Structure formats: C-alpha cells, structure tokens
Image (cartoon, helix red, strand yellow):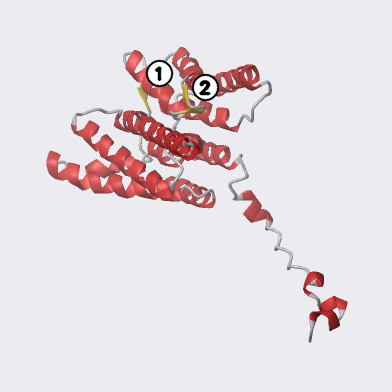
Amino acid sequence: MPETLMPASLTPDAVSPPKPKPASPVSRFFSSENRYLPPMLITAILLVGQVSSGLLESFSRTALAIVVAILFELVLGRLSYGRFPNLASAYITGISVGILIRSPAFWPYALCSAISIVSKYVIRWKGRHLWNPSNFGIAVLLLLAPEAVSTLSIQWGNDMLPLLVVWTLGAVITWRVKRFHITATYVASFLAFAALRGLITGHGFLAEASPITGPMYQLFIFFMITDPRTTVSSKWAQCLVAFLIAATEMVLRLNENIHAPYYALTIVGPAAMAIQLWWTAKGSQKAIV
C-alpha cells in the first residue's frame, strides 16, 4: 500500500518508538550514577572489620581523619571552583586514612587527611590530579614519619564470613560501576606473583598469598586501584596498569618492603595517568595540524 494511502495511524511518522523500560530501584541504586555506593561499601568494611577483628585504632582517630578531610575539601573546593563539592570522595579519603593509619598519636590522622585532600588541588597536571589521594597521603607519611606511623596489618582471622560479606558487596558494586575488571586483574596477578614469590623465598604459596585476605587489601583493591579520577580510561590499559602494580609490589616485597602495595600504586598509577594525558595531548595537536 503506498504511504499516501495508508491510514494516519499506520504511517511511519505516526508510529512511536517503544519507550525504554524504566530502571528498577535496585538498578538505579547499583548504578555508576549513585555516588554514595562507594561510601556505603567502605563503611560496611569498617563495621564488619571492627565487629569481627577490632579494625580501628580508635573511633575518635578515624572521626578526626574524616572531619579534617571534609573540612579541607569544602575550603579548597570553594576556593578553587567557587562552589562546595560533593563530599563523597572526601569521606572515602578520610575513612580510608582512619582505617589504614596506625599511630598512638592523633596528629598523623589529621596530617594524612590534610595531605591527601591538598594533593588533589595542588599536585595536578593538565587539569587532573594523578595520585589516589589517600594512597598518596599514606605513602608520604610513611616516608616522612616512619617512627611515628605504621599501617593496618591485621587479618580477618579464621572467620571467613566477614571476608565473604565484603567481597560480595565489593564485587557487586565494582561490577555495576564497570570497574570490577581492574580488581579481578589485580587479584589474579597478585596470586600469580604470590606463587612466584613462594618459590623464590621458600615461604610457600599460602604464606605469600594470605595478605590479600586482610581488610587493608579490601580497601586497596576496591577503592584505591579503581579510583575513577586517577585511573586510565581504556579497559585494556586499566588491566595492564593493575598487572604492573602487582608486579611492582612483588619486586618491593622481595626487597622486604612491608608497605609494598602503597608504594607500588604511588609509582605505577601516576606514571600511567601521565602517559595517557601526554598521549592524548599529542593526538590533539596532530589533529589540529
């Protein structure tokens, strides 16, 4: 039938495209747009770890780290951009510092949070900060004040339930925000290198692999190496960087560096971001020419 003879209700212009099915509340909750998912996950890690293993040095020290991080974020965000930023990132930074730092004094918690947030605004290249804030602050403090500061090293113990809870939550959330491949690549690489280290040191696989079951590594694999602001953009490059972080960590561990994961991320992550920014800028210049 010619289009001119079709009833108006059957002409192509009159046929409305099917409306997309609205996302369910669960899908909206577990989506990359929900910026409060990571803070909820890290809070769950804190609660599970504190109940099962006494994770924190003290609630007051962790609260101090969170408050300092939020205050610095508010002030620097206002001064830099003329508005108050979303505080989800500052909360994650503060609570990470509160969990990971170990010191009998209060000042390291405040100083580490301050360094972490300031680094986002001061140490920038081509409009981006290169270091994961909490990882940078912890690495700086470990270098400057090793006699006063250490890091979390306790394990979950023999109870696997806390580990399963955290891994389930972390896997679901990182999958939904399309970052799980980074975590999976790092874990697989860590286990492979643990087997290699076991052969080299004679300690065996389980002794070398056991650290990844601790709460420190849960923060490291679900938050630090997956931080969207400080990871490269392409999926294959993200996996490559995760592998290189695990490889660098192995070298540091073989040299008996007990803070190997922090230093490995401090070295590899920013270098990868800098290379990507340089390559992108070079491509833009070629396109203009």
Q: Residue furthest right?
A: 8
Q: Position of residue 94 (x, y in %)?
A: 52, 26
Which of label 1 and label 2 is nearer to you?
Answer: 2
Quick check: 59 above or below 33? above
Q: In which quarter of the view is residue 130 placed? A: top left
Residue placed most toward the observer, 54 or 254: 254
Q: Position of residue 29 (x, y in %)?
A: 63, 49
Q: Going by the image, does 266 lie left or right of 249?
A: right
Q: Which residue is mark 1?
A: 103
Q: Earlier in the sequence, mark 1 or mark 2?
A: 1
**Residue in view at x 47 percent, y 12 percent:** 107
Q: Position of residue 277 (x, y in %)?
A: 44, 33
Look at the numbered disc 2 and give the secondary structure of its residue. helix
**Residue in view at x 56 percent, y 37 percent:** 39
Quick check: 179 above or below 75? below
Q: Amino acid at mark 2?
A: Ile
Q: CA distance from mark 1 to mark 2?
A: 20 Å
Residue placed most toward the observer, 288 or 227: 288
Q: Which residue is mark 2?
A: 117
**Residue in view at x 68 percent, y 58 percent:** 24
Q: Amino acid at mark 1?
A: Ser
Quick check: 100 above or below 213? above
Q: Quadrant of the N terminus?
A: bottom right
Residue 206 in view (yes/no) = no
Q: Residue furthest front?
A: 289
Q: Going by the image, does 73 lie left or right of 210?
A: right
Q: How many marks?
A: 2
Label 1 Cα crowd, 10 Å radius (few <14 / some 14-19 / many 20+): some
Look at the numbered disc 1 and give the secondary structure of its residue. loop
